[in-house]
Image (cartoon, helix red, strand yellow):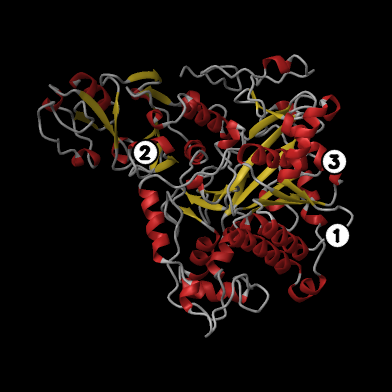
């Protein structure tokens, strides 16, 4: 080890001895080695390496700006998935970057990406995931697992030739020096894979205006504020955009290509530099960005400012969704009983939080579940089959969990809806059903669905009144409203509130109905025409066959804007490439918001939606990843022979990731 240590030292690298436990020590039986001085000064190795088990490299300025990205594969759920996704994400930013890095593999199967930079940072966690249900059973205290992190100033990593460490690419004596843009690409690609958001939490306000109802100005702005515009007004400049992020350069600093990113899926702002008002490694929501930049983190002043702009719900007799206590109604009737909290905390400790119900689509279950009392919004372009997909989900909930639904679909005839549910129930066209099968399917629909006449236009109040009446007669589990733009306006209320606040009021009423009646709502919303103009280009396109075809819309693209996503418990985009020969039968399900992940579900990666295909006869769907018919649970091999196009997913790329010039990375 001493010979290698001298070799690294001569290359300008600070090194320390480590034991088999990765702790700094000169031998296995020695006490911990005092290594802090090695992070401040480049010291020549001496006898401390004579009996050392291994060698570690000290990162940061002392070693000429060495930084290491540590990919911890032992914490991934599916073997090989983390490295594959990270490499793919890096290639979206810089297709030639991977082959420049020094790469070594650790004994646990993880990887180190090592390089030099003129701007090494501190140690940062870049990507983590939530613990699975099985992991929580074995260790209820381990809620998250780190997947990717950096080692920079003040950190070190164990390196080759320590036993078990294998150098796959590059040399420590000739480390590459990355540009700031290349370094940012590595960091941003890792952040894109992060599932555990450490968001800046605003301090609780000491005083609340008597006029304010449930939603404060701070919370309201956090749901529908435009923090990207606030950043641009403060001098941050958007220098690049891809399907996941806006990449921004900080004000008055031209050396680095960008110093932060604004993630589109959840409107969160991240910074990579410590030279701003923001702290690296944390996420900032719209209110945090606004308060810091506009009012120097004075949250009382921020709340007053936002309230004057119309943010927050006020008790004006219109936005009320809960009764107001009076002298005849004791205050205790409006306060949650303490036993509720005790019961919840107990279940959380024991891992007993009830999970949402299965959709019968295995791949979708990882991201989306049937949940009672949830307000669900589904968005997408017109004519991509949203109604068909939602009727299928309704049928699955009834078939698997005995759910009952009220269906308000004024753009489709009741006969069409009845027939579609029958065919989904038996996975068979009505034309080939026997009399017995027809009777069975008919009874199923009548037992589980109440279908509203389509020859009348209803307001949202009409729909909620109908739902309450039906719920009293026979308990229903869900209300399907299809589509929202066919729901008539309450003109008196619209005139009183104005268009923007009107839609907020409607969605607030939908949410309140769900909570008060333990009944979910599925609201189908069309995307605005402008969203159709955004088409895939070669940059960031998941498949060259899709170039020129409309991209999946964003959650703010639904008619009425981001207020629907803000109010929704879960928000889903349904997308299909209707004019693409290769993919016209494939429906993509993008889960872009899951309010309560502890009960199951998580957002899908932007370029990795859940994909389902129509079965022959258009009477069900195939889970492409799981390769099963989601109604019959049969394998799809025999069904595939009956379809003209090939249903099998494309063959996965080999472990090597090919670059633009045909050269491949050997790891």
Instruction: Select label 1 or label 3 by which is in front.
Output: 3
Residue at mark 1: 457
**Relative to residue 642, is residue 594 drawn left or right?**
left
Q: Give how far apart the Cα atoms at labels 1 and 2 are.
A: 51 Å
Residue at mark 3: 416
At mark 1, the secondary structure is loop
Quadrant hosting residue 55: top left
In this view, the residue in front, 418 or 219, is 418
**Relative to residue 35, is residue 290 drawn left or right?**
right
In this view, the residue in front, 590 or 613, is 613
Which residue: 46% across, 34% down?
A: 178
Q: Give how far apart the Cα atoms at labels 3 and 2 are.
A: 46 Å
Quadrant hosting residue 581: top right
Q: Give how far apart the Cα atoms at labels 1 and 3 are.
A: 18 Å
Instruction: Select label 3 or label 2 by which is in front.
Output: 3
In this view, the residue in front, 151 or 405, is 405
The circle on residue 137 is 2
Q: Are marks 3 and 2 in contact (CB under 8 Å)?
A: no
């Amino acid at each position: 080890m001493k010979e290698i240590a001298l070799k690294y030292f001569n290359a300008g690298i600070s090194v320390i001895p480590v034991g088999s436990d990765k702790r700094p020590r000169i031998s296995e039986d020695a006490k911990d080695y005092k290594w802090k001085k090695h992070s401040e000064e480049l010291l020549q190795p001496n006898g401390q390496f004579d009996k050392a088990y291994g060698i570690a490299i000290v990162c940061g300025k002392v070693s000429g700006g060495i930084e290491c990205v540590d990919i911890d594969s032992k914490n991934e759920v599916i073997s090989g998935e983390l490295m594959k996704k990270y490499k793919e994400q890096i290639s979206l930013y810089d297709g030639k970057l991977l082959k420049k890095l020094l790469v070594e593999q650790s004994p646990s199967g993880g990887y180190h990406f090592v390089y030099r930079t003129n701007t090494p940072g501190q140690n940062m966690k870049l990507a983590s995931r939530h613990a699975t249900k099985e992991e929580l059973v074995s260790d209820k205290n381990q809620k998250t697992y780190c997947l990717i992190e950096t080692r920079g100033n003040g950190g070190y990593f164990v390196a080759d030739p320590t036993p078990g460490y294998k150098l796959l690419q590059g040399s420590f004596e000739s480390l590459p020096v990355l540009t700031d843009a290349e370094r940012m690409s590595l960091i941003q690609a890792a952040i894109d894979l992060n599932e555990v958001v450490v968001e800046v939490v605003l301090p609780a306000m000491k005083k609340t205006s008597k006029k304010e109802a449930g939603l404060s100005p701070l919370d309201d702005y956090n749901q529908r504020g435009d923090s990207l515009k606030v950043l641009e007004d403060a001098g941050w400049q958007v220098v690049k955009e891809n399907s996941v992020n806006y990449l921004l350069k900080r004000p008055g600093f031209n050396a680095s290509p960008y110093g932060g990113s604004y993630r589109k899926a959840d409107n969160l702002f991240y910074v990579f530099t410590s030279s701003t008002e923001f702290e690296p490694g944390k996420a900032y929501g719209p209110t945090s960005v606004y308060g810091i930049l506009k009012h120097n983190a004075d949250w009382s002043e921020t709340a007053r400012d936002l309230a004057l702009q119309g943010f927050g719900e006020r008790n004006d007799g219109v936005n009320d969704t809960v009764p107001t206590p009076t002298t005849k109604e004791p205050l205790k009737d409006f306060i949650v009983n303490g036993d509720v909290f005790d019961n919840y905390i107990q279940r959380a400790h024991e891992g007993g939080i009830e999970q949402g119900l299965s959709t019968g689509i295995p791949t979708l279950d990882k991201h989306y579940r049937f949940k009672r009392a949830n307000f669900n919004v589904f968005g997408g372009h017109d004519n991509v089959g949203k109604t068909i997909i939602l009727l299928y989900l309704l049928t699955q909930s009834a078939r698997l969990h005995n759910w009952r639904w009220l269906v308000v679909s004024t753009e489709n005839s009741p006969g069409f809806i009845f027939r579609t549910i029958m065919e989904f129930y038996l996975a068979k066209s009505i034309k080939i059903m026997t009399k017995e099968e027809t009777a069975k399917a008919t009874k199923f629909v009548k037992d589980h669905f109440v279908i509203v006449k389509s020859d009348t236009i209803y307001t949202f109040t009409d729909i909620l009144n109908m739902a309450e009446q039906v719920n009293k007669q026979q308990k229903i589990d869900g209300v399907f409203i299809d589509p929202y733009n066919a729901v008539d306006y309450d003109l008196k209320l619209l005139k009183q509130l104005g268009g923007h606040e009107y839609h907020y009021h409607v969605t607030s009423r939908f949410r309140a109905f769900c909570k008060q009646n333990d009944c979910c709502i599925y609201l189908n919303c069309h995307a605005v025409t402008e969203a159709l103009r955004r088409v895939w280009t070669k940059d960031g396109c998941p498949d060259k066959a899709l170039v020129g075809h409309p991209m999946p819309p964003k959650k703010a693209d639904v008619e009425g804007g981001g207020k629907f996503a803000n109010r929704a418990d879960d928000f889903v985009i349904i997308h299909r490439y209707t004019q693409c020969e290769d993919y016209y039968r494939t429906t993509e399900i993008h889960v872009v918001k899951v309010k309560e992940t502890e009960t199951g579900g998580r957002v899908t990666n932007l370029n990795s939606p859940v994909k389902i295909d129509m079965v022959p006869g258009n009477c069900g769907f195939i889970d492409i990843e799981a390769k099963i018919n989601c109604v019959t649970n049969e394998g799809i091999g025999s069904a595939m022979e009956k379809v003209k196009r090939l249903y099998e997913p494309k063959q996965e790329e080999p472990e090597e990731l090919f670059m633009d010039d045909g050269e491949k990375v050997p790891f």
